[in-house]
Structure formats: structure tokens, C-alpha cells
Amino acid sequence: MHIFEFQKMMSRLFFHRDYERGVEETYCWLVEELAELGEAIEGNDREAMEKEFADVIAWLASLANIKGIDLERAAIKKYNGKCPKCNQSPCQCTV
Ligand SMILES: [Zn+2]
């Protein structure tokens, strides 16, 4: 499954609720899920990490759906096989 397909699936499942909730509240959910991911990483709990990574990409997709952003297109546009800053692969940035 591509990122695009995942985002479409999330739209089928949740767009009606995401749209009603709106951008600000959906963004807050994403931030909350990122905090939970941080806790899972800190606890070094692999099962919890998997669950939280899934929640983060799900809420990211929901937010992108509300704003009409194609995540896969945006990601490939910026990160097209090389570092967007130094244009090298692998990245040769010093900072
Ligand atoms: Zn670089």
C-alpha cells in the first residue's frame, strides 16, 4: 500500500468525522499522538511504539485530508531521492 492509498483509506473511514471536527482539533489530536509516541519511545515499549506510530500517521493523514493535501505527492516533491538542502544522497549536510 502506498501513502496515497493509505490516505484515501483514512478518508473513506474517517473524513466525515475529521471534516466535522475541523483543522484545529485534529491538529491537537496529532500533537497528542506525537506526545504518546514520545512516551512509548522513552519506555522502549516496541508494541506501544508500533501503535503510536500508526496513530501518528493516521492523524497526519486525517489532517492532510481536511486540508486537501496529498501527502505522498508532497513528500516525494520535497524528498525526491536526495536531501532537499544539500541535494546529495546520502545527505552530506554538516549540521
Ligand atoms: Zn543534506
Image (cartoon, rainbow, N blue to C red):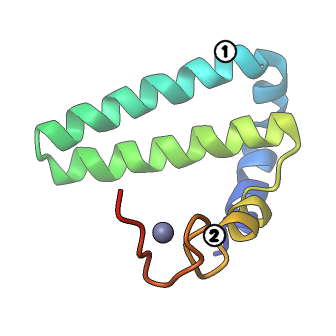
Q: Indicate the quadrant where residue 33 lies.
A: top left
Q: Position of residue 62 (x, y in %)?
A: 70, 39
Distance between mark 2 and mark 1 Cα atoms: 28 Å
Q: Which element carries disc 1, helix, strand or loop?
A: helix
Residue occupying image coordinates x 71% and y 70% = 76
Q: Indicate the quadrant where residue 83 lies.
A: bottom right
Residue 25: mark:
1
Dot 2 or dot 1, earlier in sequence: 1
Residue occupying image coordinates x 41% and y 75% = 92
Residue 79: mark:
2
Q: Are marks 2 and 1 in contact (CB under 8 Å)?
A: no
From the viewer's side, name the closer residue of 84 and 67.
84
Q: Indicate the quadrant where residue 30 lies.
A: top right
Q: What amino acid is found at the position of numbered circle 1 in the picture? A: Glu
Residue occupying image coordinates x 43% and y 82% = 90
**Considering only vertical position in the picture, is 12 above or below 76?**
above
Residue 81: mark:
none
Q: Is 37 positioned to the left or the right of 65 in the image?
A: left
Q: Is mark 2 within 8 Å of ligand 1?
A: no
From the viewer's side, name the closer residue of 12 and 6.
6
Q: Position of residue 36 (x, y in %)?
A: 33, 30
Q: How many neighbours does mark 1 have within 10 angstroms: few (below 14), some (14-19), or many (20 or more)? A: few
